[in-house]
Image (tube, rainbow, N blue to C red):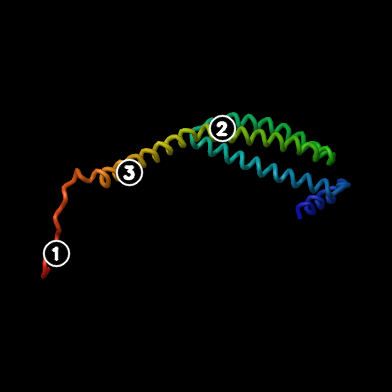
Amino acid sequence: YQDFAVNMMLYLSGRALPPDPAIVHEYRQRVHMLAVRKDSLLALISFVDSFGGNPRPIDEGLGALDLVVSDMEASYLDQEFVTALEKTNVVASKVSEVEELAVRVKNAALAWVYMIEWLSVTAVSLFSGSLVWTLMVRRMMFRETGVTRGRRGQ
């Protein structure tokens, strides 16, 4: 349906229809996937920023990515569909580089969260272990109680 709607707009505006619809369809599919990946990068920037991380390297990578995307879109608008499809590979590799950078920045931002979580779990397990050891193994520290019986008539 997406291809039909775009082709209809091209026809109504008097522009030539794409000579090979398969190439144009593949281009549009790749552009859609790249847009989804870019949206997830923007969400990751917001996540990193909420934990006090520095999202500036990701922003710079996205700025460089926008230059490559504008070149790709220019080829598409000039109806150089084969060239535009080839440029999607360049954009995809650039998005992969920015995604790897984003993961490194996220891990750096969450390092203290992971450290605090690990220390909390370790402290609780040490405390509970020493408490169990005191109550179960060193029970000689506590005096034995006599047998208690309930009273009748209450």
Residue at 65% across / 31% down in the picture?
Answer: 61
| Label 2: element kind | helix
In this figure, which residue is indicated by the disc labeled 1? Answer: 150
Residue 68 in percent (x, y) is at 73, 33
Q: Which of 59 and 151 is in front in this view?
A: 151
Quarter of the rendering containing residue 146: bottom left
Residue 98, visible in the rendered structure: yes
| Label 1: element kind | loop
Dividing the image into 4 quarters, which one contains the C terminus?
A: bottom left
Counting residues from the N terminus, which is met first, the one under dot 1 or under dot 3?
3
Where is 8 relative to 94, above or below? below
C-alpha gap between disc 1 and disc 2: 66 Å
Q: Nearer the viewer, residue 83 or 121?
A: 121
| Label 3: element kind | helix
Q: What residue type is labelled 3?
A: Ser
Q: Which of marks 1 and 2 is in front?
A: 1
Crowdedness of circle 1 by 10 Å Cα count: few (<14), some, many (20+)? few
Where is 21 relative to 154, above or below? above
In this figure, which residue is indicated by the disc labeled 3? Answer: 128
In this figure, which residue is indicated by the disc labeled 2? Answer: 105
Residue at 14% across / 64% down in the picture?
Answer: 150
Crowdedness of circle 3 by 10 Å Cα count: few (<14), some, many (20+)? few
Total label count? 3
**Circles 2 and 3 in contact, beta carbons < 8 Å:** no
Q: Which of 154 and 29 is in front in this view?
A: 154
Residue 56 in percent (x, y) is at 58, 29
